[in-house]
Amino acid sequence: MDLYTKLEKEFRLVEIQKKALAKMGISTIEDLLYYFPIRYGNTSQVTNVGTLAKGDDSTVFGKVTGLKTSKAFIKKIPMSEAFVTDETGKIKLVWFNQPYIAKMLHEGQLVRVEGKITERKGELYMSNPKIEGVNTLPNAVGESLFTKTEANEEDVHVMYPVYPESKGVTSYWIYHTIQKIFRSGIIDSIVDPIPKEILEKYHLPNIRSAFIWMHTPKKDDDALSARKRFAFQEIFFIQLEKQKERKLWSKKNAFKILADKKNTDSFVKRFPFEATLSQTKAIESIEQDFQRGYPMSRLLEGDVGSGKTAVAATTIYTVTTSRPSNKDYGNLQTAYMVPTEILAKQHYENFITYFQHLPIKIGLITGSGCQIFPSKSNPTKPTSISRAQLLKWVANGEVPILIGTHALIQKSVSFKHLAYVVIDEQHRFGTLQRQKLTSKSDIVPHLLSMTATPIPRTLALTIYGDLDITLLDQMPHGRKPITTKIILPTERDNTYTEIRKELKAGRQLYVICPRIDEPDPTKELAVIAKSVSLETERLKNDIFQEYIIDSLHSKMSPAEKEAVMKKFSEGKTNILVATSVVEVGVNVPNATMIIIEGAERFGLSQLHQLRGRVIRSNHQAYCYVFAESQGQKTRDRLKALITAKNGFELAEFDLSQRGSGELYGRKQWGISDLAMEAIKNLKMVEASRTEAVRIVEEDPEFSSYPLIQEYFKNQTTKIHFE
């Protein structure tokens, strides 16, 4: 047996267990060792059988009797049954899908049983409890299982692990399987991937101790030390990977682009607003990076409406007005990638406004077609052209700015002098997609990633360790803060009256619903929530009969979506009922109100993004948040939308309240809940980063650290912390 041995080779698994383990991401011995408890129970909290009540989580000690295997009456599920008896009474024990348990125990055996008390037909019983044989019974309730003696003080175990379960795999099974792995001696041969000097410097346990303390802690401090060590390990290896990427990136060649401050300033003055200080600083930072001779790799993080696009446009101007190396003709090229066609078209129209005074071509490429500006017939308008023609001009270097969706990364798209890549809403794209775009040129282009999803500093330092980070933390001058209101069901009519006043003043309204169509009432797990289809009809017929109402959702074709958005942006539609398809980037300055129905079904990040749709002008904006659930947890979470001054504060709040949270989750970032929890600890993040930077500077290939090399080889794409 070794770490990479498949579990089914060493342990007899039935089909339901194999399916459950696959679902849990567990296939090898190592996977199971890294499957950590979600909490720990305490066996010193002992209860007498006679005092048990329905709903209690209890630990009882006694003799086991009446052991037998049987099948459940209704579904014929195989199960084990028994009774546990102490001096105050007896209670029935039932284990579904675990007939083997009755064979593991014997009549009259002393046991410790832990589980939840359930009731059926007036009889109390424990369903799927954790059971373990013991040598002695405690003398009184609350006394530890093991008698403390001076000679044997260290043998006192009062904590037991509780693991996330899946149908067919119980916490009890996981615990006992891990104990068997421990008894095999395999953990004595595990080599620690973290260098010894780092463990000693930060007082972290070695990997053998950490595994034992994680799965069988004697006290809280043991479990805490183990969790701290494994959290550090995960963050440390992410940092090593990011710092190595950064080192490799800095050795590549890029176009040296020299900015002319006078020209930059005159371009910025073309915007219909005055640039903020943070925008000016961001532009300066990017233009300094252009001059270094190796590729820039920068994340521009700005709250919704903070002016990221203006920063991108200004730096694109610097690139576009520069010549390729050693040439006095032609332009350097920029690729600008966005996640949706609606947003691509919107940016394309904005860029035409920004750059129409220059003698350059701007291209648009999406899944539904291509355009070029200016057209031959009308120099002030764009025109549709064939994909082949656009790609030919791009490959020849005749199109300095190409805006598009994922269509940009297709093999058929090639550039002559690609010097700059801008990725908007970068969290919507994977690392491989970004790499495909930046590898479309012999000389590596400068990379600017932009996001309106505010990320806490500690998470940014971890996830984006290979990027320089620039914050846009100011809003354009004259922009009023949005008024956000959490609306109770009794306040709905008053809210509609308030909205009608704004509609009469010429403003427009978004209404966001979680569903497109009504749920099927025959489906047991159907999400019961407001739908675009029914809400559109209700508002038309019962609430805002005098206004023009339209709907928008992801089932519509790109042409249909575009037609609906065009009518809304031109003011021909007063109210747009939509799903969260309008979340990213859509810009309608006259739409100053948004209703979000079923707000508890959206993450805080999504709510913040949706709210951002209505802060696109200097008119007062309003966000009305309707929650179907009015529980305390929902109210507290939604209240943060009002109390947080900006998205960055909201992100920090979410991190402190929820760990992995909704602004960023394990699935999005590939980080475990354990490490996400640790990311609250700035000192730990900075320590892991410091050590990673030092090692990569000294030895970028990790030649002196063969264990780190081995760890990356086996673990980079395969971490199953839970």
Image: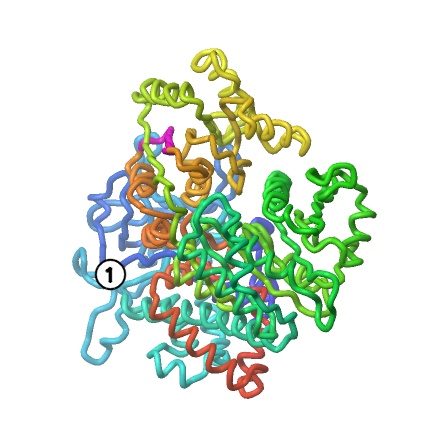
Is residue 103 toward the left or the right of residue 245 in the image?
left
Q: Considering depth in this image, is 361 or 57 the residue closer to the camera?
A: 361
Which residue sits furthest left?
A: 140
Residue 584 vertical position relative to residue 553 in the rendered view, above or below:
below
**Secondary structure under badge 1?**
loop
Q: Which residue is mark 1?
A: 137
Camera-nearest residue between 425 and 308? 308
In the displayed orientation, state which residue is furthest to the bottom: 704
In percent of width and height, residue 62 lies at: 27, 54
In the rendered image, residue 42, in percent from the top left (x then y), is placed at 27, 58
Q: Nearer the viewer, residue 543 or 91?
A: 543
Question: Residue at position x 69%, y 48% from top?
Answer: 362
Quick check: 535 above or below 390? above
Q: Is residue 520 visible?
A: no
- Color theme of the render: rainbow
x and y percentages locating residue 248 in the rendered image: 60, 75
Q: Which of 480/344 is in front?
A: 480
Task: Classify the position of the N terminus by image quarter.
Answer: bottom right
| Label 1 Cα neighbours within 10 Å, binned few <14 / some 14-19 / many ≥20 | some
Q: Amino acid at mark 1?
A: Leu
User: Residue shown at 65%/70% (left/top)?
Assistant: 255
Percent position of residue 492, x then y: 34, 21
Task: Tell me which residue sits at (70%, 45%) in the image.
Answer: 364
Q: Which residues are magenta?
A: 620-630
